[in-house]
Amino acid sequence: QKEVEQNSGPLSVPEGAIASLNCTYSDRGSQSFFWYRQYSGKSPELIMSIYSNGDKEDGRFTAQLNKASQYVSLLIRDSQPSDSATYLCAVKGNNDMRFGAGTRLTVKP
Amino acid sequence: DAGVTQSPTHLIKTRGQHVTLRCSPISGHKSVSWYQQVLGQGPQFIFQYYEKEERGRGNFPDRFSARQFPNYSSELNVNALLLGDSALYLCASSLDGSSYEQYFGPGTRLTVT
C-alpha cells in the first residue's frame, strides 16, 4: 500500500464546474497536509495547507480533512482552463514529506 | 522578492560521473529540502537541512549527500551516477525546521547517459 494515494486521473471537468480531488494516507499519526499544483514542465506550487479536521477555504479552493478516515480532499469551484494541471497531495511524516503521484486535471472550455 | 533559485537548470552527465546541484532558499528561510521527481510520479524526499544540520533523510543510497552553508544555501551531491538518477531535482525552502509549508525552486533537470 502506497503511503499517499491519489487517483491518477485524468479528471476532466467543464469550465465553471466544481473539480473534486481526493487523497488518502496510511500514517494515522500525520498532522499536516498540503495541496500543490504542478503545471507541465514546472515545479510544484503550494496551494493550501490544512492541519485540523474540517474545511479550509481560500478563494476558489477548499481543502477538507478527515483524520479518522485518513482522507484529504481539494475542491476547486468555478474551474477555469488555467486550473488544468497535476495536483499533488503531500503529507508530513516524522522527518520527511510524502507526496502522492498526483491527479491530472483538465478543465475544458 | 526572489524565490528559491537553483542551478544549473539542465545538466547532462555520463554514468559514473559526479554531479553537484545548488540551491538558494527564499530570503529569511533557514530550512532546505531536496526532492527527486521522475516523470509521472510525485516528488520523493531526499534530505532536509536546517541550520546546517541534517533533519531528515529519505530512502536514497549513500551516493547521495548534501550540505547546508552558513548563508542557508545548499548543495546536493550525487556520486557514481546511474541511468536511473535521471530526474528533476527539486529544492524547497521553508521558514524553519518546524514550518512545514515548503516553496519549491524551478528544479534542475539531470540527464544521465
Image (cartoon, coloured by chain):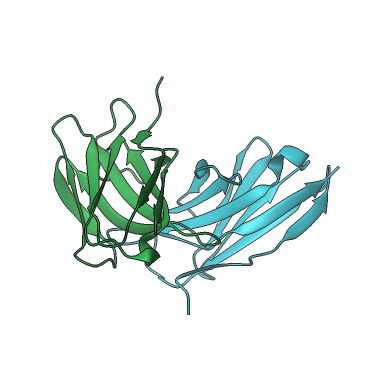
The reply to whether residue A58 is in sight is yes
Residue at left 43%, top 59%? A91
Q: In the displayed orientation, state which residue is furthest to the top.
A: B1
Along the line of sight, which residue is nearer the eye, A54 or B106?
Answer: B106
Along the line of sight, which residue is nearer the eye, A36 or B64?
Answer: B64
Residue at left 28%, top 39%? B22
Which of the 4 image quarters holds residue B57? bottom left
Q: Position of residue B30 (x, y in %)?
A: 24, 35
Which of the 4 image quarters holds residue B87? bottom left
Residue A89 lies left or right of residue B65; in this view the side is right
Q: Position of residue A55 (x, y in %)?
A: 59, 50
Residue B103 lies left or right of residue A66; in this view the side is left
Q: Position of residue A67 (x, y in %)?
A: 49, 65
Residue at left 31%, top 33%? B25
Residue at left 53%, top 47%? A36
Instruction: Check the rendered structure and report the hue given to chain A.
Output: cyan
Count the numbered circles shown. 0
Which quadrant would the N terminus of chain B be assigned to in this image?
A: top left
**Chain shown in green:** B
Q: Position of residue B107 (x, y in %)?
A: 42, 42
